[in-house]
Amino acid sequence: MSEEIEKLKKKRNAVILAHVYQRGEVQDIADYVGDSLDLSKKAVSTKADAIVFCGVQFMAETAAILNPEKIVLLPDKNAGCALADMATVEQLKILKKQYPRAAVVSYVNSSAAIKAESDICCTSANAVNVINSLPHNQVLFIPDRNLGSYVAEQSNKDVILWDGYCYVHENITTDQLKSLKEKHPFAEIIVHPECPAPVRHMVNFIGSTSQMSRYVGQSKQGEFIVGTEANFVYRLKTDNPDKIFYPVNTLCEGMNEITLEKLKLALERIDYSIHIQEEIRLKAKIALDKMLIVQ
């Protein structure tokens, strides 16, 4: 299967991008593996004719927004994001009227239409820096309330939270982490900022997946309890074979829709290409371009 994918990739002059929440075998076949910010940058810099995005819908949309001249494929049309679906343009327009002086910051985990209504986008890796870079004192943060509350804790801004959440992280509890800590007392706890505040307030490190990767790689600690999507542990083990990781075993259904077979079929048939209305794409690109400037 991997050999067939490699042949098809060369035939199509394609690049395969995989998020760190993908299955291990999908990560292994990818040209680049990373978080949303890393992959957004790779999408912009690639010289390939086609981008096969092994992630979820909003990620493939982001690649298409930034690369209108390229074919962008999502190997499974059902690879969606429940968090992104929690924000609608109609709701956003109502809130924009209620808070006319607020800057609209949309987490990259949102639809192209939401991005088009935003002043700037952010990822979990640069959300705090994005908020702090704005001249506005008030910010409407969409759609993740947990990441938004984390950002508010790191900023002096008035952050208005949208009532959305990522179930992968919302389902992580303090009891789970306490239980794992009792079993592995020498392990440090690292979690994603999409986790609820009570979870974030009991850990050793909070960060995006790329930030967690760097923290683990630089740490002298040998054991870690990992509070994010379970497939991320595959990446951590691959990069740190001498260290031990204990996942909380929470899975993203959308991320796990993609398999090697579906990846091969996408390249064979050019299936599930992403198309975005040009008016929406141009507006969304402005917000994404601003995001990419902020480190």
Image: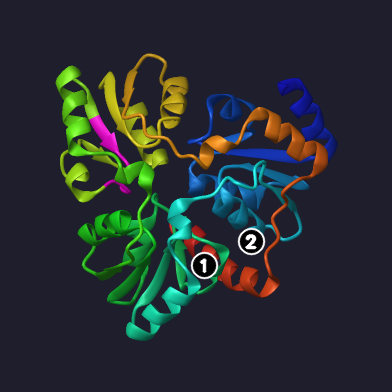
Residues packed near mark 2 inside 10 Å, few (<14), some (14 to 19) or many (20 plus): many
Image quadrant occupied by the N terminus: top right
Q: Which residue is mark 1?
A: 115
Residue located at (53% from left, 62% from top): 111
Residue located at (49% from left, 60% from top): 110
Mark count = 2
Query: Which label was assigned to residue 1?
Result: none
Q: Which residue is mark 2?
A: 65
Image quadrant occupied by the C terminus: bottom left
Q: In the rendered view, would you say 115 is above or below 199?
A: below
Q: In the rendered view, would you say 172 is above or below 148?
A: above
**In the rendering, at what x and y percent does residue 147 appear?**
32, 54
Q: Is residue 108 visible?
A: no
Marks 1 and 2: in contact by CB < 8 Å?
yes
Extreme residue toward the right, this view: 11
Extreme residue toward the top, this view: 242
**In the rendering, at what x and y percent does residue 190 appear?**
27, 34
Q: In the rendered view, would you say 257 is above or below 85?
A: above
